[in-house]
Amino acid sequence: MNFDDFTKRISKIKNLPLLGEESHNKMAPSIRIDELSRMKNQRDKARKAAVMALFYPTEENSTNLLLMLRKTYKGVHSNQIGFPGGKVEKEDKNLLATALRETYEEVGVPQQKIQVMAELSSIYIPPSNFEVQPYIGLYPNPAPFVIQESEVEHLVEVSLLDFMDDSKISTQNLTTSYAANIDVPAFKLGGYVVWGATAMIMSELKELLKQLL
């Protein structure tokens, strides 16, 4: 879709009711749904983080969504696809400030260049004990991205057309940080399997966009 048209349509997203767990669970493995049900009381004690679902125009003025492959490290989210974002730091005045700061640090997008459109439903991630708040942002005049070498392996630039294509969703058998050989619903985008919390966030985002596009 033309980015100008996309910008006009997504401006109405803040008026839509959020879908929350109903949409999250469509992209959650059964083991995660059971775990979330058992651990509801743990969410109040979770560490806080925020991420940015960033849309931007290509040179041809079509619309892309930015994802990234994280570096391999000793942690539960090692070598996974995710949104720019991270944990709250002391200097952050709120969760939106966290998402904007992390987006600048990880992919080099200046905070003042992002138009924040709305927030999505927060999501709890039991393996890392994080409560993550996602935001939707537009980057209408993009400069080349600058990745944070210590955190980001490389960027995964996804066309809106692919993101909205239901055929890009399938079930994958994966071994994760918390389970072996489990079937998980996942997006197949840019040659990568996108699953877990990122896919759950994307599920809500996609269902909201379907109401506007």
Image: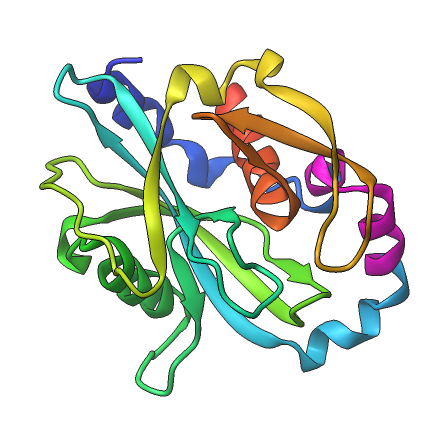
Q: Is residue 49 left or right of residue 161?
A: right
The majority secondary structure of the magenta stretch comes to helix
Residue 136: x percent and y percent? 39, 44
Q: Quadrant of residue 37?
A: bottom right
Q: Which region of the structure is painted magenta?
A: 23-36
Residue 82: x percent and y percent? 47, 48
Residue 197 in view here: yes
Does the stretch in magenta take in 33? yes
Q: Quadrant of residue 125?
A: bottom right
In the image, residue 59 sits, relative to residue 79, either above or below, namely: above
Residue located at (72% from left, 72% from top): 43
Q: Is residue 28 left or right of residue 90?
A: right
In the image, residue 63 sits, relative to residue 14, either above or below, namely: above
Residue 212 in view here: no
Residue located at (60% from left, 15% from top): 166
Name the residue at the bottom extreme.
90
Q: Is residue 66 left or right of residue 133?
A: left
Residue 73: x percent and y percent? 50, 66
User: Which quarter shows the N terminus?
Assistant: top left
Residue 69: x percent and y percent? 42, 47
In the image, residue 81 sits, relative to residue 203, either above or below, namely: below
Q: Quadrant of residue 144?
A: top left
Does the stretch in magenta take in 55? no
